Image (cartoon, rainbow, N blue to C red):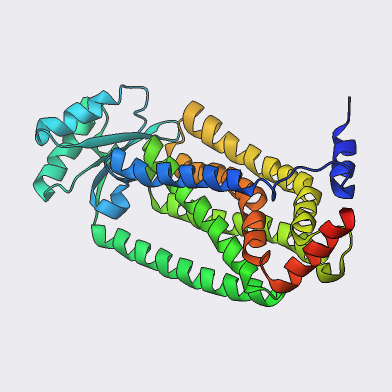
Amino acid sequence: MTSLRTIGNELYSGKRSFDFVGKRNIWYIVAAVAIIISVALPFLKGGFNFGIEFRGGSEFRLTNSQELPQSLAVDAVRSVVAGVEVSVTAVGANDLRIQTEQLADVESEEARLALAEAYKVDDSTVASSFIGPNWGADVTQQALTGLAVFLVLVSLLMAFYFRSWKMSVAALIALAHDLILTAGVYAGVGFEVTPAAVIGFLTILAYSLYDTVVVFDKVRENTLEIEFSETRTFGEMVNLAVNQTLVRSLNTSIVAVLPVASILFIGSVLLGAGTLRDIALALFVGTIVGTYSSIFLAAPVYVHLRENEAALKSAASKVLAGRE
């Protein structure tokens, strides 16, 4: 049986190769279908499940209450405000977080006392607060502003470093793909979009770009004087670079995904740390999708953008003619 080390060496030398660039139309179709599904999911699911920080509302915190059914909280709040939408989340081992739409001051106090009575705890262990939607709007605006500035700076830096604006375009296409798919997963599973989730979204930008830059750095090295190559075309050299960095990309992804998966599945599902799953889901999906896009999307798109350049077409013709 061939060892992983042997496979890695064969990928680096070119003895073994996966045709990522040559089969790019397949990857384009897969990406297009995934994007269409991700865009459609929010509409099919009735939109994103925005947290109270974005939509505004009242929040109650109960301490030492998780041993009792969460349905008690719903009944207690609805006994004060009939028909109100109530969201109950376990926080840590012994706390509950109850969120509702904005309640009047009197209703909020009555709901707080009703919760204390339902769980048979002192009313001092039940805290109530109100969060206005303006806070979420400010956070969203700042996040979008930061995202725009980040993308502009990254585009300029990559264009300067790699001396090719087409690499920046390919990287941004891959990045947009990652963000759309991650957002689609959020809409599909119905997790709350909270400030922690926004942080997770911004974090995966860095990871996705890091993996893409690693691939593109090898692409640049392999294609420095590609116009004079007599053995490989531009597309083949880029494909070789992707294969040479494949093991590194997969190893980095696995190392990054494992701790995030433990937070997502063990922390939030088994231990009930509900506040961790918002950021963990974004990191988990974003890391996997970011690795996929750097291999199957960024490099093939870069080849697509450059392969029709006169110098590259002429060089490719000479290579193909020599093979005949």
Image quadrant assignment for residue 88: top left
Residue 287 seen in this snapshot: no
Viewer-proximal residue among 305 and 42: 305
Q: Is residue 10 left or right of residue 187?
A: right
Q: Residue at x 30, y 54 (%)?
A: 54
Q: Is residue 67 left or right of residue 260?
A: left
Q: Is residue 11 left or right of residue 36?
A: right
User: Percent position (x, y) of residue 136?
Assistant: 31, 59
User: Percent position (x, y) of residue 306?
Assistant: 66, 66
User: Percent position (x, y) of residue 316?
Assistant: 78, 62
Viewer-proximal residue among 135 and 49: 49
User: Percent position (x, y) of residue 40?
Assistant: 35, 43
Viewer-proximal residue among 172 and 147: 172
Viewer-proximal residue among 275 and 46: 46
Above or below — where is 53 with respect to 91? below
Above or below — where is 226 with respect to 13? below
